Amino acid sequence: MADQFGETTRNEPFNITHFLIRFVVGAVVLAITAALTPGFRIAGIWPLILGAIVLALLDYFVAKLLGVDATPFGRGITGFILAAAIIYVTQFFVSGYQVTLWGAIIGALVYGIVDLIIPGKSM
């Protein structure tokens, strides 16, 4: 079903396969983003996995609480700012995940571009 902005809403039931694909895509996009972004470092596979989980959870809660798509290109400047904030805040939950404020801003841009290239919604 499409909403007033022409985007499809998520009314389908939980699907473990869909969740796992989104998680793997999210982890790959996060790894590429950290590799390409100055001021953004993930020190190993476990911080990457935990970072992808925390990013997904924070995105989910922002979407549920605020009703805003927190992807870099989801809702223009609002989505971009929320994506940068989520990338930045994740470091407080995951040891080995470090990002500066500028790294989070640049990372949100890189994340959005990589997310557009790789199929599947990651955040």
Image: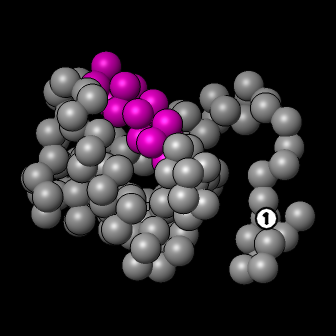
Residue 100 left/right relative to 111: left
Indicate the position of residue 91 as horizontal and vertical percent values: 22, 37
* Residue farthest to the front, as pictured: 65
Q: Nearer the viewer, residue 56 or 66?
A: 66
Query: Looking at the image, which residue is at 43% across and 73% down?
Result: 78
* Residue farthest to the top, as pictured: 46
Indicate the position of residue 2 as horizontal and vertical percent values: 84, 70
Indicate the position of residue 119 as horizontal and vertical percent values: 62, 54
Query: Looking at the image, which residue is at 39% across and 69% down?
Result: 80
Residue range highlighted in magenta: 45-59
Q: Residues within 10 Å of mark 1 (few under 14, many from 20)?
A: few
Query: Looking at the image, which residue is at 72% across and 80% down?
Result: 5
Type of residue at label 1?
Thr
Q: Nearer the viewer, residue 5 or 32?
A: 5
Q: Nearer the viewer, residue 13 or 30?
A: 13
Q: How is the image coloured?
A: one colour
The image quadrant of residue 81 is: bottom left
Residue 30 left/right relative to 64: left
Indicate the position of residue 31 as horizontal and vertical percent values: 33, 41
Query: Which quadrant: the N terminus?
Result: bottom right
